[in-house]
Amino acid sequence: EHGEVAAVASTVQLAPPLAEPHAGQIAAALMPALAAGGNLLVFGMAGNAPEMARRFNPSGTTVFVDDNFALVTALGAGNPSIKFLHVSYHTSVSKDFERLKDPQTWPALRLPLPLQLVDTSWDAIYVAGPSGSTEQVPGTAPTSSPGCFQSIYTASILARASAAKASKGVVTVLVDDCERPTERY
């Protein structure tokens, strides 16, 4: 079993560490909510996930949710103090952008997460994925990327529930790449 994990780990390419000033901007947004060691939920594997957890939430609990099974397996095996969860997205930027215009379809965007994550009172939620959530470039074939629809919708549900549970009533939610149409909508 350990040989399989090592084999997977050797084939996984980690994203480069977060570059300054981007990492500084993320830290400035998230760290006030995590100052006393809080609960941080991250959709996507932005930069180097273990480095990010140690830097932004050193005394708290950090959970990364991602659709890259090999990456989740490799990082989970090498970092037992950080939690990693594999999920599958069922949306596509090229097919589902119009869906956002109809609020009646939004509940279908909710990611099925384990009850333990749903019941957690999150102090901060960072949406940085799934990776590859690029928009279609004019003159190219439509992208089958899942986009961040499900991550953003699920983050909003979890943030509202966490804020209702928390005595302070506030949860910090940071959406990366918010200049793209998918994230702005």
Image (cartoon, rainbow, N blue to C red):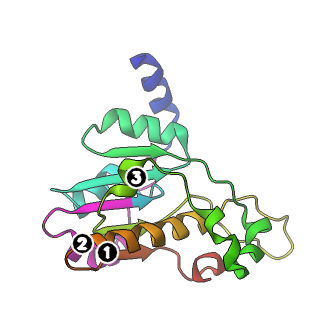
Crowding near the residue tagged with mark 1, few <14, some 14–19, many ≥20 C-alpha atoms within 10 Å = some
Q: Nearer the viewer, residue 145 or 95?
A: 95
Which numbered disc, 3 or 1, marks the residue closer to the eye? 1
Quadrant holding the N terminus: top left
Query: Residue at label 1?
Result: 163
Question: Horizontal and vertical percent for residue 179?
Answer: 57, 83
Q: Which residue is tagged 3?
A: 64
Tell me the residue that label 2 is attached to: 166
Observer-nearest residue: 86 or 44?
86
Residue located 54% across and 39% down the image: 69
Name which residue type carries label 3.
Phe
* Number of other residues with Cα within 10 Å of mark 3, as a class: few under 14, some 14 to 19, many 20 or more: many
> Which residue is at a point 62% across and 59% down the rendered structure image?
132
Q: Nearer the viewer, mark 2 or mark 3?
A: 2
In the displayed structure, would residue 88 be above or below residue 33? above
Tag 2 near tag 1, CB within 8 Å? yes
Which mark sits nearer the N-terminus, 2 or 3? 3
Q: Residue at x 15, y 70 (%)?
A: 35
In screen coordinates, is 98 left or right of 181?
right
Relative to 149, 36 lies left or right: left
**Crowd rating for badge 2 (residues with CA inside 10 Å; few <14, some 14–19, many 20+):** some
Magenta-tinted stretch: 14-41
Residue ID at (53%, 70%): 152
User: Was residue 38 drawn as part of the magenta stretch in this picture?
Assistant: yes
- Tell me the amino acid under the disc marked 1: Ala
Q: Is residue 16 magenta?
A: yes
- Secondary structure of the residue carrying numbered label 1: helix
Considering the numbered disc 3 on the image, is that residue within a helix, a strand or a loop?
strand
Quarter of the image for residue 41 reads bottom left
